[in-house]
Image: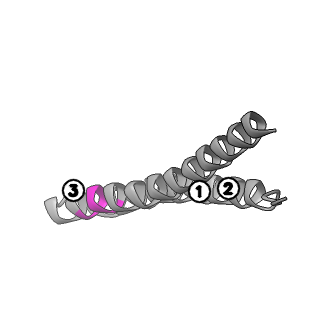
Amino acid sequence: MYDFGYLKPISNIFDVLGRVFVALSFIAALVAYATSEESLYGVLIGVLIFIGGGLFGLFFMLISQLVNLFLQIEENTRRRLD
């Protein structure tokens, strides 16, 4: 009846994007820390970049997992009704 086959690749794309955002935020935080010349301001910017980018990446991974959860619920519901 319904075809949700295109949602699985979209979920995988969101998962990969989330992991990329977390990795890039970690790298950007290290770069900000390394170029800070031991000032507190540079360390604070590095920490904020890591926290902000990490949360943004985790949000994308959360969306991916929610899509997977809804797909599994739909599949189990359809299996029970047939």
Q: Residues within 10 Å of mark 1 (few under 14, many from 20)?
A: some
First-in-chain label (2 vs 1): 2
| Disc 1 target residue | 20
Q: Secondary structure at mark 2?
A: helix
Taking depth in this image into account, of 32 and 58 the one nearest to the observer is 58
- The mark lying in front, picked from 2 and 1, is 2
Residue at (32%, 55%) from the top-left corner?
Answer: 51
- Pair 2/3: label in front: 2
Residue 81 is situated, as x and y percent measured from the top left of the image, at 75, 39
Residue span colored magenta: 45-49
The disc labelled 2 sits on which kind of residue? Ser
Q: Residue at x 21, y 56 (%)?
A: 38
Q: Quadrant of the N terminus?
A: bottom right
Q: Nearer the viewer, mark 1 or mark 3?
A: 1
Q: Amino acid at mark 1?
A: Val
Upstream in sequence: badge 2 or badge 3? 2
Q: As drawn, which residue projects farthest toward the left?
A: 40
Q: Could you tell me how far apart the alpha carbons at marks 1 and 3 are, in whole angstroms?
A: 27 Å
Q: Nearer the viewer, residue 73 or 67?
A: 73
| Residue 67 highlighted magenta (yes or no) | no
Secondary structure under badge 3? Answer: loop
Tag shown at residue 11: 2
Spatial CA distance of label 2 from label 3 is: 41 Å
